[in-house]
Image (cartoon, rainbow, N blue to C red):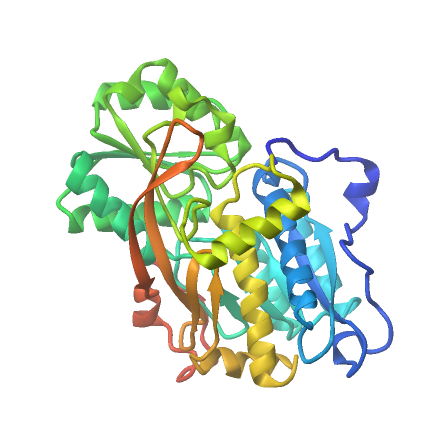
Amino acid sequence: MRKSLPQTAATAALALCLSACVGGAGGAASTSGPIPVGSVLDLTGPLSIYGVPKSKVTKLAIDDINAHGGVLGRKLSLVQYDSQSSTQKNVEYANLLATKKKVAVVQGGITSASREAMRPALRRLKTLYFYNSLYEGGVCDGNEVITGETASQFLDPLISYAAGSLGKRMYIVAADYNYGRISAQWIEKYAKKYGAQIVGKEFISLDSGNFGATLNNIQRTSPDVVVSVLVGANHVPFYREFAAKGLNKKIKIVSPSFGLGNEQEILSPAEAQGIVTSYNYYQELDNPSNAAFLQKFTGAYGKTHPYVTDLAISEWNGWHLWAAAVNKAGSVDRKKVLKAIESGQVSIDSPSGRVTADGPTHHVVEDVSLAKVNARRGFDVIKTFPAQQPSYEKTVCDLIKNPSLNRAFTP
């Protein structure tokens, strides 16, 4: 999980099929045999720190669904492609899954940039799309279901905690693409709500690992809190250099991205301990579904597996919610599955807690927890907020009343 997979000519050119790649007459339209389903994740390149664990949980989810009878009495056959940390590849493989493989659903994309590239293509091709990553919020698309947390679910409690417990002078450091930039807008909004002040703001290219000037600016402005929305392997050195300068002794870090790539395992406890995050899932959550999941994961990948992340569990949630919606609909037909989602009666007991599809917004209602990196390279849960609604999306997006809506709203 910590390293990119070897990128040979074969992985650059070919799909990685985790089970038999189903073509055959009719694909998902067939009424018998395995149902082809598609996944597009970054298994190589700098985003593989997220994509490899998501791929592992994807395969485990498909195996789990099949072990419980599949959907509608039919097994699922997974076709997975490596998008190689390339937005262009996300689109290429989404098109291939929809047109050649004729899958019933495509799940995948990690960054908001990959999502925004894939969703118009899949909408045009009338292929259902599930996006299983937390994100900046605001997307309203009748052909898409989003199982990750939105800004109103995870940033609001994080900034509230920071302002109330750590200090009101905040410095934002964010990845320079739509997730980082729009998240920064939400951070500014919530900072104002909780009486905090933004004293600095910087955006760092995803391919940059140079933080000298940024750290000097932080040192000069001396905020109480750094809000880090840094993303990908190239941004990990920020935390190491932050600690090397001794800034972690006087300035706290809160983050809606730290740990999603197992940064707390890459860094030493001295470099990472005390960073506060806000996600739907932590491996330490104490519930029967999480205990059962971790037993399955250990059985499949060994006892010494890396920490299981929130992003990985979103894949579990996405596949199981889709399966539950198909069984409720009695069909893999896209429109019927979406109607089941919009009923508000599709729920699963996830390792992260109860997850329920919110019909009007095509998002989910789910628990969110605040947690702090501990000395064991894991997290200590501070507080859990149950059944958090996608509150902002509810104010701008009602796909039951306005099914033709197709836009991304921003704060």
The correct choice, above or below, for 136 with respect to 11 in the image is below
Q: Closest to the observer: 73 or 260?
A: 73
Q: Position of residue 102 (x, y in %)?
A: 75, 71
- Quadrant for the C terminus, please: bottom left
The correct choice, above or below, for 291 with respect to 144 in the image is above
Q: Closest to the observer: 405 or 285?
A: 285
Residue at 57%, 70% (x, y): give it.
322
- Quadrant for the N terminus, please: top right
Q: Quadrant of residue 137?
A: bottom left
Residue at 47%, 49% (x, y): give it.
310
Q: Position of residue 374 (x, y in %)?
A: 37, 31
Q: Position of residue 403 (x, y in %)?
A: 46, 81
Residue at 24%, 32% (x, y): give it.
225
Query: In the displayed image of the protein, which residue is found farthest to the top?
Result: 245
Can the viewer see residue 411?
no
The correct choice, above or below, for 267 with respect to 381 in the image is above
